């Protein structure tokens, strides 16, 4: 029995020498909650703001030709836009880089109708927990303006 | 070699305890093994590799305080001015030191620095800073016996300040060119080209289904003036959710779309400028076993020109990605803000 114990100890000792230098600690904490559930939407454009420390992506549905080489700029009924804003932090794995942090707000704009050149919009803003948050008129208009003036990112 | 010596001793002790052999037989085995080890060890001293120091032809030129740090911490391996310690010349260390210096000079050599294109010099300088920051450089095994190679926190700040200043000068004006857009959609282009699609030399083809995938990260970098969206397929997203990224499962695909950044507007907003390139990582541990199971591809410009003339181009990719071994070799993964451990 003692011989077996001693053998095990020696085997452990041998293993230590064999794998010496090959181990590394890993304490990574992933944050899958920062991945936006985009459903059937696609990216129209993205951006970031160094002063506010935020990054944004404007998503949209395919109605009205939001994507591709022949995308149009006008707003047409049926279009849905979601402007997602994340916090931004230095990339922990690359000095010189920034990466998005948690989701701060999800603003949804639906183009509900159109009459005599005017479009009707429905606006809803939520936080990362799904709670409705109230934005003032200026904030709402800023988002709608960003959407109506949108310059889609150039994809190949 | 030293490890082998200890293994021999432990191995003979185990044989002794397991009573497979008599004590005399054990002694004979031990004598044979130790003698063999000694002979091999002695022969290694005479056949140890030598390190040549060719004349420096185009040295690194930077601020003196930066150069001094590089000279002290990096030049022994990454230049032709190697100053070996006496123990570096003794086998088996001489073999390890020689191999490390050979590899180090291949990666970059401060003595032939001007042979590297300025843009690549910038890339390499940032890589050095990040390798030091992550504790990967100097190599821990080297720093153990060569403490002068260690870079202090204060010195690292000097290096960070240097590279940040360099890139700020180079990239802060932003992309002011008119933004080019694809004249036809990828599908139309595919039809025109009889279903031919841009394909990397390792067989990875461009595809556009990633546009229907989830964005797993949104990043931007001052070191090259770009912003990126990183898409992951369902296998990738599921792996992140299940915390199974080291290793990532086969079938995981990550696509990074890179744009130049436009100048910041009056409110601090930065928008994407011209499309730069698309990078693809495909996990297949059998097919890409030489590069930690990841296949790499890059398609540049709106015409999606594949990068690399030889499959070995991926070696440079994985060399950089080895900085994040704990992430399964992927840099841009969503992480919590606190308790991050990168060393």
Image: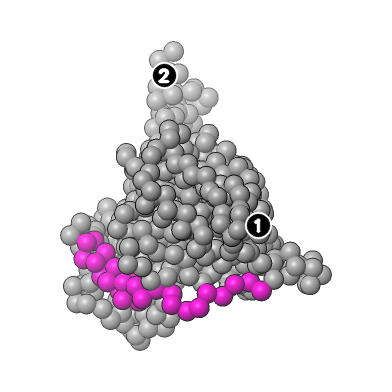
Q: State the image coordinates of residue B186 (x, y, percent, origin top left).
A: 70, 66
Which numbered marker is on residue B290? none
Q: Tag 2 or tag 1, which sits nearer the N-term?
A: 2
Write down the quadrant of residue B139 in the picture: bottom left
Write down the quadrant of residue B266 in the picture: bottom left
- Disc 2 sits on a residue from what chain? A
Location of residue B198 with respect to B39 vertically, above or below: below
Observer-nearest of A6 and A34: A34
Observer-nearest of B53 and B111: B111
Queried whether the magenta region covers residue B161, the answer comes back as yes
Observer-nearest of B261 and B40: B261
The residue range painted magenta reads B156-183
> In this figure, which residue is indicated by the disc labeled 1?
A64
Q: How many marks?
A: 2
Which numbered marker is on residue A5? 2
Please name the residue shown 43% across and 33% down the image: A131
Q: State the image coordinates of residue A122 (x, y, percent, origin top left).
A: 52, 44
Q: State the image coordinates of residue B316 (x, y, percent, origin top left).
A: 50, 65
Q: Residues within 10 Å of mark 1 (few under 14, many from 20)?
A: some
Drawn side of residue B103 relative to residue B342, left or right = right
Location of residue B181 with respect to A109 vertically, above or below: below
Location of residue B322 with respect to B63 vertically, above or below: above
Q: Secondary structure at mark 1?
A: loop
Observer-nearest of B71 and B161: B161
Q: Marks 1/2: CA distance?
A: 75 Å
The answer to whether residue B269 shows anywhere in this view is yes
Q: Residues within 10 Å of mark 2 (few under 14, many from 20)?
A: few
The answer to whether residue B48 shows anywhere in this view is no
Q: Secondary structure at mark 2?
A: helix
């Amino acid at each position: 029995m003692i011989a077996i114990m001693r053998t095990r100890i020696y085997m452990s000792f041998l293993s230590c020498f064999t794998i010496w230098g090959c181990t590394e600690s890993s304490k990574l904490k992933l944050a899958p909650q920062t991945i936006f559930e985009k459903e059937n939407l696609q990216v129209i454009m993205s951006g970031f703001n160094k002063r506010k420390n935020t990054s944004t992506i404007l998503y949209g549905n395919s109605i009205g030709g939001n994507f591709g080489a022949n995308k149009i700029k006008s707003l047409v009924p049926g279009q849905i836009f979601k402007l997602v804003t994340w916090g931004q932090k230095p990339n922990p794995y690359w000095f010189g880089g920034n990466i998005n942090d948690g989701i701060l707000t999800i603003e949804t704009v639906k183009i509900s109708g159109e009459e005599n050149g005017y479009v009707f919009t429905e606006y809803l803003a939520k936080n990362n927990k799904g709670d409705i948050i109230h934005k003032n008129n200026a904030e709402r208009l800023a988002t709608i303006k960003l959407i109506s003036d949108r310059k889609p990112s150039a994809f190949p | 070699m030293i490890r082998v010596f200890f293994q021999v001793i432990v191995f003979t002790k185990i044989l002794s305890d397991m009573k497979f052999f008599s004590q005399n037989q054990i002694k004979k085995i031990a004598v044979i093994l130790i003698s063999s080890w000694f002979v091999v060890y002695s022969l290694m001293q005479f056949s140890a590799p030598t390190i040549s120091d060719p004349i420096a032809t185009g040295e690194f030129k930077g601020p003196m305080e930066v150069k001094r740090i590089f000279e002290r911490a990096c030049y022994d391996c990454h230049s032709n001015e190697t100053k070996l310690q006496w123990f570096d010349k003794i086998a088996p260390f001489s073999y390890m030191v020689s191999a490390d210096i050979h590899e180090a000079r291949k990666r970059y050599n401060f003595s032939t620095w001007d042979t590297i294109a300025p843009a690549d010099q910038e890339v390499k300088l940032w890589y050095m800073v990040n390798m030091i920051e992550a504790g990967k450089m100097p190599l821990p095994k080297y720093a153990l016996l060569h403490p002068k190679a260690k870079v202090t926190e204060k010195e690292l700040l000097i290096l960070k300040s240097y590279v940040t200043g360099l890139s700020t000068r180079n990239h802060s004006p932003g992309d002011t060119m008119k933004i080019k857009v694809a004249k036809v959609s990828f599908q139309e282009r595919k039809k025109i080209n009889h279903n031919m699609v841009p394909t990397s030399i390792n067989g990875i083809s461009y595809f556009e289904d990633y546009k229907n995938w989830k964005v797993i990260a949104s990043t931007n970098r001052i070191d090259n003036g770009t912003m990126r969206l990183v898409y992951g397929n369902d296998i990738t997203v599921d792996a992140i959710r299940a915390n199974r990224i080291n290793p990532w499962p086969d079938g995981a695909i990550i696509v990074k779309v890179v744009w130049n950044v436009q100048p910041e507007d009056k409110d601090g907003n930065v928008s994407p400028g011209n499309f730069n390139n698309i990078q693809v990582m495909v996990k297949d541990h059998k097919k890409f076993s030489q590069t930690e199971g990841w296949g790499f591809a890059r398609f540049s410009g709106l015409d999606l020109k594949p990068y690399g003339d030889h499959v070995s181009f991926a070696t440079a990719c994985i060399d950089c990605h080895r900085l994040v071994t704990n992430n399964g070799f992927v840099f841009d993964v969503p992480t919590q803000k606190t308790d991050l451990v990168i060393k």
